[in-house]
Image (tube, rainbow, N blue to C red):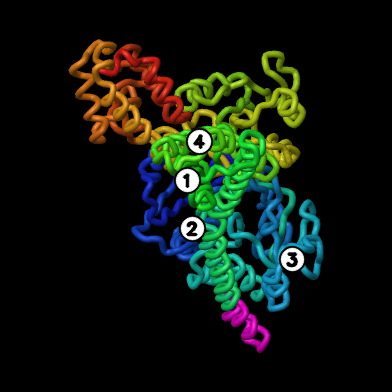
């Protein structure tokens, strides 16, 4: 915003609706020219914006969502365009998401009864280019051409200040969604036009203002449409639509609740069926090949196999098999844990109940293969359109000067993401891997998964055309303003002490990793205790080793953890050993980097490897 208004006389206001992440304390020192308004409660989008209206002194007012990026030409070109249209009351722009995809809410029609019916019935989605069935999103109008439309998006809406004062700003009966439709309607009713200006494109990381709760999003949206219809459509058709909307809200809420209940069970049920089939197939194969067609003669065997199938799926779930964004490698670890759990329990059963270790082992291995094959054929749970970049390469698009300033930040805050190199903004830089216009081609050749645009000498105007060209490629994009200590991307922005970035997520925070970490702690503590005479012969500090066994059993310690004491990483129990060995074995800077890597890429198998590597130090 400040870059886009650098050569203009502007005033900038930021309204905080009772955020709980200390974002105001973080942002205020960084932007002394911005006027911040802090609300103790969340009054909603409309009322928060109206708070600022009496304070504005400019000829025009720009309403702008916090999850947007403006190119350097945006304000200048918008003002030129709106001033050329004497009957213009408001102006909206072409919006794309963080992957370069056009957002259809950039231009819309009023939700008249028939228009709303087509949208609610799903006909708009079936015929996205239709001017009749998808009139709500004006699907028949070219997104790259200027139009006079009914509704503009409140995410970026430029309005004449005098007109806003005349209309008393947004209608505060709307909490979230609908207030821009209502204001657009009243602007048209006052005799002015709403301009869709395709000459400016902005990035809108859609959904950051409303969060990721899809049910709540649907509820707010339909309730906003209901308020609009009740206010502006008093005809019989409008009243009928209001009743229909109320029914739609109830049906969508019920459907969302059913889907939320059933969806988490779909994969476990499918996997349970695959495990049962695998064990049954192995059972009958074993009988035919090794027992001459004679069954095992174990009572209730037909009931035992479903029980073992349930146990297998339960153990896999405990190890994180069905958590969101689970990778194939993590699934394999979960399945190995399930196999070990199944075989361990089976070995503890009485001899009269056990029927064949071979069937259990080979049936479990067959089930593992089938489950992983099913994930390859069908998308595994939690899979998203975004690529998993935790193991991918990163390139930075920047000038040589901005690159030199950005690399220390990356190494300090995001050094766990491999940096492949730099792309220059323009051709002809022999020190770079390539240039920005070649990004789509280089992504396929060099196989990087994430792109960081460093906005300094590089402008957002240069980035946007290339970003849209890459919209179908499996890339994740981040934006960093040169000289700042922050990045923004396509997921929720979370302020920290020094960086705002969606990428700093830690695997050690995942529930299944926390569960498995505790299982590993308990398992090895019991093993060490049961074999204590042998362990004491091998340990260097015997008394400390015995104390550590009980500390871990009681939950006061974990066998593997951080080398340093820090509040910058997810909290875990104090550790006996770290990934670098005993605390103090390396420099504090190396310890901090190692701890961040440990938390970022945590996998419970890693704890096992570290325990074996530093086994002789477990008495420290």
Compare marks 4 and 1 and give the one earlier in the sequence: 1
The one nearer the camera, 106 or 184, is 106
Q: Nearer the viewer, mark 2 or mark 1?
A: 1
Task: Give the alpha-carbon distance from disc 2 to disc 4, as whole Å.
Answer: 66 Å
Compare marks 2 and 1 and give the one earlier in the sequence: 2
Where does the image place residue 526, in percent across and percent down from the top left?
30, 29
Q: Is residue 373 above or below residue 136?
A: above
Number of the label disc, if any, that sits on residue 286: none
Task: Give the alpha-carbon distance from disc 2 to disc 1, as whole Å.
Answer: 64 Å
The residue beneath circle 3 is 124
Q: Secondary structure at mark 1?
A: helix
The residue positioned farthest toward the left in the image shown:
543
Q: Given contact means CB atoms under 8 Å apart, are the residues at marks 2 and 3 in contact?
A: no
Compare marks 2 and 3 and give the one earlier in the sequence: 2
Q: Is residue 110 left or right of residue 163?
A: right
Q: Nearer the viewer, mark 2 or mark 3?
A: 3
The stretch in magenta equals 228-245
Q: Secondary structure at mark 3?
A: helix
Compare marks 3 and 4 and give the one earlier in the sequence: 3
The residue beneath circle 2 is 56
The residue beneath circle 1 is 311
Count neighbours of disc 1 (C-alpha within 10 A) and say few if under 14, some if 14 to 19, many if 20 or more.
Answer: some
The one nearer the camera, 495 or 250, is 250
Q: Residue at x 70, y 57 (%)?
A: 104
Compare marks 2 and 4 and give the one earlier in the sequence: 2
The one nearer the camera, 445 or 48, is 445
Where does the image place residue 497, in percent across and percent down from the top left?
38, 35
């Amino acid at each position: 915003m400040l870059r886009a208004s650098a050569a203009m006389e502007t005033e900038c206001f930021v309204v905080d609706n009772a955020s709980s992440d200390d974002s105001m304390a973080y942002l205020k020192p960084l932007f002394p020219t911005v006027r911040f308004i802090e609300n103790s409660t969340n009054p909603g989008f409309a009322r928060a914006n109206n708070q600022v209206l009496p304070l504005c002194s400019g000829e025009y007012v720009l309403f702008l969502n916090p999850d947007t990026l403006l190119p350097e030409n945006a304000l200048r070109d918008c003002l030129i365009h709106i001033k050329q249209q004497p009957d213009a009351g408001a102006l909206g722009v072409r919006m794309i998401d963080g992957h370069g995809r056009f957002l259809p809410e950039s231009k819309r029609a009023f939700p008249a009864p028939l228009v709303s019916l087509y949208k609610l019935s799903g006909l708009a989605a079936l015929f996205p280019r239709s001017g009749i069935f998808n009139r709500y999103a004006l699907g028949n109008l070219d997104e790259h051409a200027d139009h006079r439309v009914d509704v503009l998006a409140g995410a970026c809406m430029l309005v004449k200040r005098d007109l806003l004062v005349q209309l008393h700003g947004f209608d505060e009966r709307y909490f979230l969604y609908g207030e821009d439709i209502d204001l657009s309607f009243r602007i048209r009713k006052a005799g002015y036009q709403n301009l869709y200006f395709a000459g400016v494109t902005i990035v809108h990381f859609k959904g950051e203002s409303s969060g990721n709760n899809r049910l709540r999003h649907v509820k707010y949206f339909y309730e906003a449409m209901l308020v609009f219809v009740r206010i502006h459509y008093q005809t019989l058709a409008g009243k009928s639509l209001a009743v229909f909307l109320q029914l739609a809200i109830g049906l969508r809420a019920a459907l969302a609740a059913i889907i939320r209940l059933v969806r988490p069970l779909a994969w476990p049920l499918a996997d349970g069926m695959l495990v049962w089939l695998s064990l049954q197939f192995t059972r009958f194969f074993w009988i035919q090949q090794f027992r001459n067609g004679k069954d095992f003669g174990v009572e209730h065997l037909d009931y035992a196999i479903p029980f073992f199938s349930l146990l297998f799926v339960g153990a896999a779930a405990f190890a994180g098999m069905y958590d969101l964004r689970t990778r194939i490698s993590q699934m394999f670890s979960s399945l190995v844990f399930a196999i070990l759990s199944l075989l361990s329990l089976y070995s503890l059963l009485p001899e009269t109940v056990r029927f064949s270790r071979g069937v259990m082992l080979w049936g479990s291995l067959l089930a593992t293969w089938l489950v992983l094959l099913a994930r390859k054929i069908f998308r595994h749970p939690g899979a998203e359109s975004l690529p998993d970049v935790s193991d991918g390469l990163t390139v930075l698009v920047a000038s040589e000067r901005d690159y030199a300033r950005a690399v220390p930040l990356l190494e300090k805050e995001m050094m766990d993401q491999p940096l492949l190199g730099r792309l220059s903004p323009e051709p002809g830089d022999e020190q770079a891997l390539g240039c920005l216009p070649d990004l789509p081609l280089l992504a396929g050749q060099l196989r990087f998964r994430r792109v960081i645009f460093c906005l300094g000498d590089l402008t957002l105007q240069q980035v946007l055309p290339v970003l849209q060209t890459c919209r179908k490629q499996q890339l994740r994009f981040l934006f960093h303003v040169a000289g700042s200590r922050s990045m923004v991307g396509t997921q929720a922005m979370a302020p920290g002490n020094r960086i705002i970035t969606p990428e700093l997520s830690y695997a050690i925070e995942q529930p299944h990793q926390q569960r498995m970490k505790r299982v590993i702690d308990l398992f090895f503590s019991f093993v060490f205790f049961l074999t204590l005479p042998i362990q004491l012969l091998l340990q260097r500090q015997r008394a400390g080793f015995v104390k550590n066994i009980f500390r871990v059993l009681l939950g006061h310690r974990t066998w593997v953890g951080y080398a340093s004491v820090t509040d910058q990483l997810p909290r875990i129990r104090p550790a006996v050993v770290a990934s670098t060995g005993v605390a103090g074995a390396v420099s504090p800077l190396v310890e901090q980097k190692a701890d961040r890597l440990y938390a970022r890429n945590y996998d419970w198998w890693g704890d096992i490897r570290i325990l074996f590597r530093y086994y002789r130090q477990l008495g420290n």
